[in-house]
Amino acid sequence: VRAGAPIRLELRLESVVEGVLVSGTATAPVTGECSRCLGPVDTEVEVDLQELYLYGPPGRRGVPAADDDDLPQVVDDLIDLEPAVRDAVVLSLPVSPRCRDDCPGLCVECGARLADVGPRHTHAQSDPRWDGLRGLMENKENE
Ligand SMILES: [Zn+2]
Ligand SMILES: [Zn+2]
């Protein structure tokens, strides 16, 4: 997700006894490099969000409650959505992004993108790992 890229939020904020329950979805544009062919990946991810923002103790709204330090708080009547959105989006990103689901990758011989050169792309040269065997065959023919 490029810095400054717009992230679309569709959220429902509900007042509950302990605080404010936020639920909905975040949609973010995602760019990167295909793990198979190194071509550009340009897509977006949509993630579900649900996070409870606690009120501080009565009379101390905005002051984090000591035993709930790890949970997000309503501070000065505001909630900070960024950590929740960031965590949800980061977790949804693919470890091996692909430009398309059936990306054929690169030719192992010349590195051409198989999506560009077509499925019948081949090379006449034989695999060098067979050179030793070919030598044996030729010796036999000479005998
Ligand atoms: Zn690809
Ligand atoms: Zn090739």
Image (cartoon, rainbow, N blue to C red):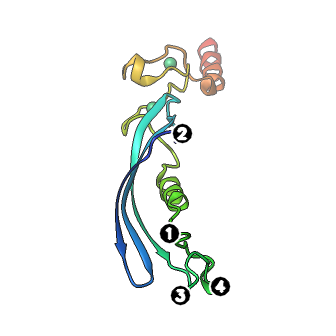
Q: Report how far apart the C-alphas of labels 4 and 1 lie in the structure.
A: 18 Å
- Viewed as shown, does residue 71 lie left or right of 100? right
Q: Is label 4's Cβ within 8 Å of ligand 1?
A: no
- The label nearer to you, 4 versus 1, is 1
Q: Which residue is mark 4?
A: 66
- Which residue is found at the position 54% from the left and 27% from the top? 108
Q: Residues within 10 Å of mark 1 (few under 14, many from 20)?
A: few
* Label located before the other in sequence (4 or 1): 4
Mark 1 and mark 2 residues within 8 Å of each other at the beta carbon: no
Residue 4, numbered circle:
2
**SS of the residue under disc 3:** loop
Q: Report how far apart the C-alphas of labels 3 and 2 lie in the structure.
A: 37 Å
In the image, residue 40 above or below residue 25 = above
* Label located before the other in sequence (2 or 4): 2
Q: Which residue is mark 3?
A: 58
The quarter in which the C terminus is drawn is: top right
Which quadrant contains ligand 1? Answer: top left
Q: Residues within 10 Å of mark 3 (few under 14, many from 20)?
A: few
The amino acid at mark 1 is: Asp
**SS of the residue under disc 2:** loop
Q: Which residue is mark 1?
A: 77
Considering depth in this image, is 110 or 88 the residue closer to the camera? 88
Q: Report how far apart the C-alphas of labels 3 and 4 lie in the structure.
A: 13 Å
The amino acid at mark 4 is: Ala
Considering depth in this image, is 22 or 31 the residue closer to the camera? 22
- Which residue is found at the position 53% from the left and 53% from the top? 90
- Residue 70, horizontal then vertical, whole percent: 61, 76
Mark 4 and mark 1 residues within 8 Å of each other at the beta carbon: no
